[in-house]
Image (cartoon, rainbow, N blue to C red):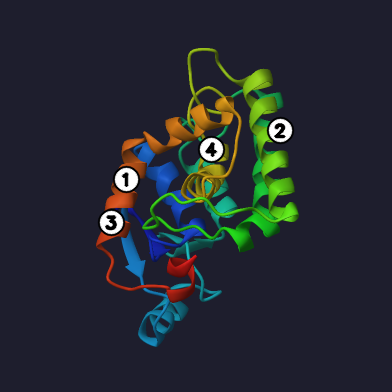
Amino acid sequence: MPLGLIVANKAYSSWSLRPWLLMATLHIPFEETVVNIYDEAGRKKLRRLSPTGKAPVLVDGDVRVWESLAIMEYLHEKYPAKAIWPKKSAARAFARAISNEMHAGFLPLRQHCPTNFRRAPKRRDLTPEAAESVRRIEIIWAQARETFGAKKKPFLFGDFCAADAMFAPIVNRLHIYEAPVSPQSRAYMDAIMALPAWAAWSKDAAKEKWRHEVYDSL
């Protein structure tokens, strides 16, 4: 029986994107359930499916795993042959550290530039705090590539892994708000956006009928 993955609206749900993109890119079979969290019926359904009432949630038989990073760790244990984290311990430690930093940090950028897969790219000036988030993110990306990346592979640690999935919503944000980034960061963003799974998620997001008036107005 395949795993189940419960996700929220694809146009806006950065947290849902992370495990979905990882599983789709690494060809881990799963069945998705998309819940509209912007109406009461959807929120009520999610409260039945998720112990926190939030998405994403991974369902494996009687096991439920919530929180994106916890889902990735569960998948790492369940599918050890999949390159969910880098194989070398130093790289794996760095990948986990920056993924946790992403999980807990960069709030100014996340608040000022919300994820939106339906937004056409248009420049939005960053606040000083959001610009500082971008600066730190670019340092992380450069350090990962320089220390652990592979010259002929485009992702942070060579092959696509959980750390790339954790930063995927940031790629969307920097792209759609046209934040100024280095050529190296832009090349990394382009590699993420060239993934077939990214295209599939974007296509689904474009078809959604529900709208977030605030996010769509930015």
Q: Name the residue beneath numbered marker 4.
A: 164
Q: Give the secondary structure at mark 1.
A: loop
Measure the C-alpha gap from mark 2 to mark 3: 32 Å
Q: Position of residue 118 (x, y in %)?
A: 36, 58
Mark 2 neighbour density, 10 Å: few (under 14) some (14–19) many (20 or more):
few
Residue at the far left in the pictured view:
207
Mark 3 neighbour density, 10 Å: few (under 14) some (14–19) many (20 or more):
few
> Can you see residue 36?
yes
Q: Name the residue beneath numbered marker 2.
A: 139
First reached walking from the N terminus: tag 4 or tag 3: 4
Is 129 drawn above or below residue 139 in the view shown? below
> Can you see residue 28?
no
Q: Residue at x 56, y 74 (%)?
A: 52
Measure the C-alpha gap from mark 1 to mark 4: 19 Å
Q: Residue at x 57, y 60 (%)?
A: 67
Is 161 drawn above or below residue 49 in the view shown? above
Q: Residue at x 28, y 66 (%)?
A: 208
First reached walking from the N terminus: tag 1 or tag 4: 1
What's the amino acid at mark 2?
Answer: Ile
Measure the C-alpha gap from mark 3 to mark 1: 18 Å
Q: Name the residue beneath numbered marker 1.
A: 29
- Mark toward the viewer: 2 or 1: 2
Q: Give the secondary structure at mark 2.
A: helix
Q: Are marks 1 and 4 in contact (CB under 8 Å)?
A: no
Mark 4 neighbour density, 10 Å: few (under 14) some (14–19) many (20 or more):
many
Q: Give the secondary structure at mark 3.
A: helix
What's the amino acid at mark 3?
Answer: Asp
Q: Name the residue beneath numbered marker 3.
A: 204
